[in-house]
Structure formats: structure tokens, C-alpha cells
Image (spheres, grey):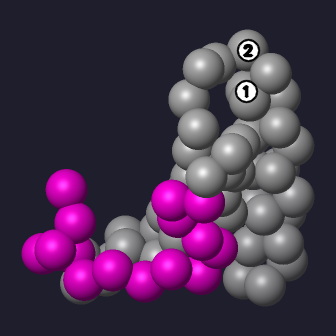
Amino acid sequence: MAVYLDELYNSAKDVFEMMGEFIGSNTFFIAINDGKVNRVVQTFNKKTSLVDNETIVNFQDSY
């Protein structure tokens, strides 16, 4: 599982950097949801940091 997550982190970082050049959004992120919490795996913040890597939010508190 650790190898899978490492690949996911690296792929997400590359995709976010590319998206950041073309899309006018400040923040992109990928999160894993287990039905109880959302765990942010990888983020891209252009100017202002809105979400950080490894942020964990209770599923009920997220939308």
C-alpha cells in the first residue's frame, strides 16, 4: 500500500502543477475518504494556502 500511496503523491503533484498553469484556481487537492474522515493526500496552493497535505477532517464536517 505504501508504494501505491507514493505513486499517488508523485502523480498528483505533477498533475496539479500542470493544472495550475491552465486553470485559474488557487487550490487543488486529492483526499481519501473512508466514510469517517477525509484525509488530504496531496495539495497544490498557488498563492494562499487553503488546504495542507495530511489535513484530516471529519467526514460529517466536510462538504
The residue indicated by pointer 2 is 22
x and y, in percent, of residue 27 in the image: 57, 44
The segment highlighted magenta reads: 49-63
- Labels 2 and 1 touching (C-beta < 8 A): yes
When asked about the image quadrant of residue 5, the answer is bottom right
Q: In this orientation, which residue lies closer to the viewer: 7 or 60?
A: 60
Query: Which residue extends farthest left?
Result: 60
Q: Residue at x 83, y 28 (%)?
A: 18
Calculate the distance from the C-alpha at mark 2 to the C-alpha at mark 1: 5 Å
The three-letter code of the residue at mark 1 reads: Met
Looking at the magenta stretch, what is its main secondary structure?
Answer: loop
- Dot 1 alpha-carbon crowd within 10 angstroms: few under 14, some 14 to 19, many 20 or more: some
Say the numbered circle drawn on residue 19: 1
Category of crowding for the residue at label 2, using alpha-carbon neighbours closer than 10 angstroms: few (below 14), some (14–19), many (at least 20)? few
Query: Is residue 41 shown to the viewer in this render?
Result: no
Give the quarter of the figure containing the N terminus.
bottom right
Q: Secondary structure at mark 2?
A: helix
